[in-house]
Image: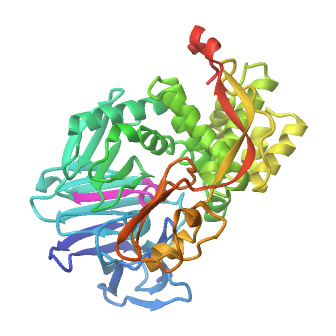
Amino acid sequence: MRYAFTITVADTATVLHVILSFRGNATGVDELKLPSHWAGQTIAAMSNLRPLSSGTTISERAAADRRALRYLPNQRVVVAYDIRKDWQGPLVPPMQFHPVIMPQYLEINGDNGLVFPAMADEAPAAVDFDWRGLPPTWTLATSFGTSVDVADRCQSYVGPWTAVHGALFAAGDFRIHRFQIGGQSAAFAVRGEWVFSDADAITQIQKAVSVVRDFWHENSIPYFLVTLKPYDAGGSSDGSGFTNAFWLYLAPRDSLATHLTLLSHEAFHGWNVRRMGPLSDAEDAVIGWFHEGFTEYYADLLLYRAHLLPLARYLENVNRDLRRFPVSSNPYVRGRVIALWLDSQIRGLSNDSLSLDNLMFDMVRGAAAPLTQARILETAARYLSPVARAELARMVQSTGAEPTELSHALAPCITVMIDSVPTFDIGFDLPASRAAKRVIGVAQSSAAYKAGLRDGQAIFGMSVFNDQPDRMARITVQGDTSRTTVAYLPRGRSISVPQLHVREAAYASNPGACHA
């Protein structure tokens, strides 16, 4: 299979042109898979799909992401299509999940930018990528290598198709730096101006990725890419993992040092789930608590173990999710708490001779089998009592189930107490209000109403820390005569939840004894 890319650069209509060619089969019938959805987003960036080889036709299928392809048997099949930016306005979340096709640069991936003949993820593939049609001043950084030389823009890959489907492709006005992580090759492709230097960023990447590789006892990865781009506006951040790579999007004034957890999270995805076995779309939707929540748990934990995250900050993050857990369906929140509980259970039942780490290593060793929720629970069952197995199943399947035993988490330096804490209640319909740019659905019993927020007020700005009842919410609205900022703590009813507290004397005398 071969992809050839050229680009038409214009301020209003930059278009990436793609030509796909491959050897057809003996039946002359195939199915094309189109990029239509990724990361919860509907992708509408592809257009002008057309056949170029003689005797080739493309016709509609019932599914929006499929096309019927017919061609002369055993002949070379050639099709072409275009990709362009499919939204209006600046690059702000969640538009990074769409193909980013700009006059200065592009970034796509296999999920949102490649058309291909339908095949199983584990099917063998030999794929060439020809990027020589890009502007000569552009640099190139992909899951399969980097280049600053126009003559070095052809890349090849041989292996399971899933690596192509999960690949990252970036090109444009990137500054490319080659460096090493544990003696292995790595590359950093960065664009824009930041409050930190490129060298400082590389140092942070080396730290975050190294602690993850050390955990997995793996330092044989021959190549790794990190791309960093600024959002055009806003204060959000995003990291996503790909084949041999991950991307970062940050607000222009962000410090990378404050996002070490994001870096280690994406690096950890190189094993969970990429090295734990074939994963179907159906199972992927079921085990978010494991592949996102457990990864989030280890992202902080490994930084704490490496003394890159203070204990107070680690506990703050864990306690926040313990407070959110009883009413949350967020897989990051639920998975982190389930991982904390499971680690405590395994340590307690084994007299501290085993931990959740052993289960994670088992999951990688069993990668020949498909990754399913049943397999995760069966693997965990080896380390648990019958009562604990039932409790794990209950927490995985039921939003309301709470962890009952956390005493071995970070013992002996931590004590678990049941605290009364306020829930987060913003006090009005936040999504509807954001969309309408006016206040909708203020509850009269809420702190928002008591502070002066009223239905119908025009919104000119807001600062809200989701799920953080102790961070001030500020909503700028049109008052009777002028704009005013309504500020309040978004606290709702109080609930009783377990919280981790430091045993100050035990920690001060021997901080290294805390089980982590």
Does residue 144 lie above or below 109 as drawn?
A: above
What span is in magenta?
159-171
Q: Could you say which quadrant of the image residue 249 lies in?
A: bottom left
Query: Where's residue 435, x and y in %?
Result: 46, 77
- Quarter of the image with the N terminus is bottom left
Q: Position of residue 483 (x, y in %)?
A: 35, 70
Q: Which of 353 and 419 is in front in this view?
A: 419
Q: Quadrant of the C terminus?
A: top right
- Looking at the rendered structure, the number of numbered marks drawn on it comes to 0
At 62% from the left and 49% from the top, the residue drawn is 333
Task: Find residue 182 and report its horizontal and vertical position in percent.
Answer: 36, 27
At 64% from the left and 70% from the top, the residue drawn is 444
Q: Can residue 334 be seen in this view?
A: no
Instruction: Give the side of residue 284 with respect to residue 227, left or right.
Output: right
Image quarter of residue 139? bottom left
285 inside magenta stretch: no
Q: Is residue 98 above or below residue 404?
A: below
